Amino acid sequence: MTAPTTDPVSTIDWRERAARAEIGAGMLVGGELRAATDGATRAIHSARDGSVLVDLAWAQPADADAAVAAAREAFDRGRWPRMHARERGEILQEFARDLGRAVFLVMTHDHQLDQTAIEWAIRKGFGFVGGVGSRAKAARTRARLEAKGFPPEDIARIRMPVGLDIGARSPAEIGVSIAGELVRWRASLFSTPRAGHEVKPGA
């Protein structure tokens, strides 16, 4: 597979796109934009000047339940179950063709589930396999993989603890650190760094 030499994102005129952007205020559930169950909103401010961009519908537990129910309904009774098995297989194969540039993040409630999921992702060839956990958990995960005969180059692809080392403690901070590592990894896929941004994947 030949990797692209330039980042297509850098060719977009982001100022022009931002000027004509329309920000939806609702949450998308079942293919429809809707308000929160209790009408709650939260003001989203511009990082440039602090102005309010939109009063965004703020989801509550009931909204999350509705979204999960809608997704389950679409999966059970939508187009997918009515498709021929061959057609479904072709779609899944399309996803599988580029897994070397795909991300698989593991953050379940159970260490054994995490281990199983990580082993599956490595075997499938995901380019980025990340796991939430302590350094001690990461060492145990790698030791189990070595004991099962996984090649060192595959084990080296695991990012655990996933996220940039920015001293994150709260869930929000951890989310930012993970997003940061994903951005850095994505940039490393392109052989030509963006102007003024030297990419150091191992930094």
Image: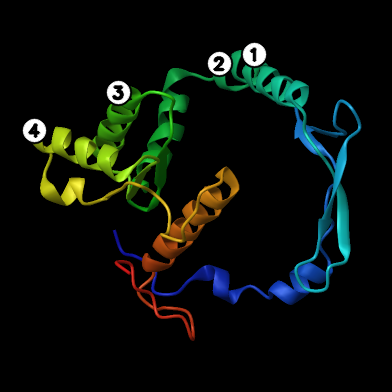
Q: Which residue is mark 2?
A: 81
**Quadrant housing residue 37:** top right
The colour scheme of the drawn protein is: rainbow
- Seen in the picture, residue 145 relative to 56 is either above or below; the reply is above
* C-alpha gap between disc 4 and disc 3: 15 Å
Residue holding disc 4: 147
- Categorize mark 4 by other alpha carbons within 10 Å: few (<14), some (14-19), many (20+): few
Dot 1: element: helix
When asked about the image quadrant of residue 49, the answer is bottom right
Disc 2 versus disc 3: nearer the observer: 3
The type of residue carrying mark 3 is Gln
Residue at 84%, 57% in the rendered image? 22
Q: Nearer the viewer, residue 70 or 167?
A: 167
Residue corresponding to mark 1: 77
Q: Picture coordinates of residue 110 (x, y %)?
A: 38, 23
- The amino acid at mark 1 is Arg
Could you tell me how far apart the alpha carbons at marks 4 and 2 are, in whole angstroms? 40 Å
Q: Which residue is mark 3?
A: 112
Q: Horizontally, is 35 left or right of 69 in the view?
A: right
Residue 100 at x, y percent in the picture = 32, 50
Residue 149 visible in this rendered orientation of the protein: no
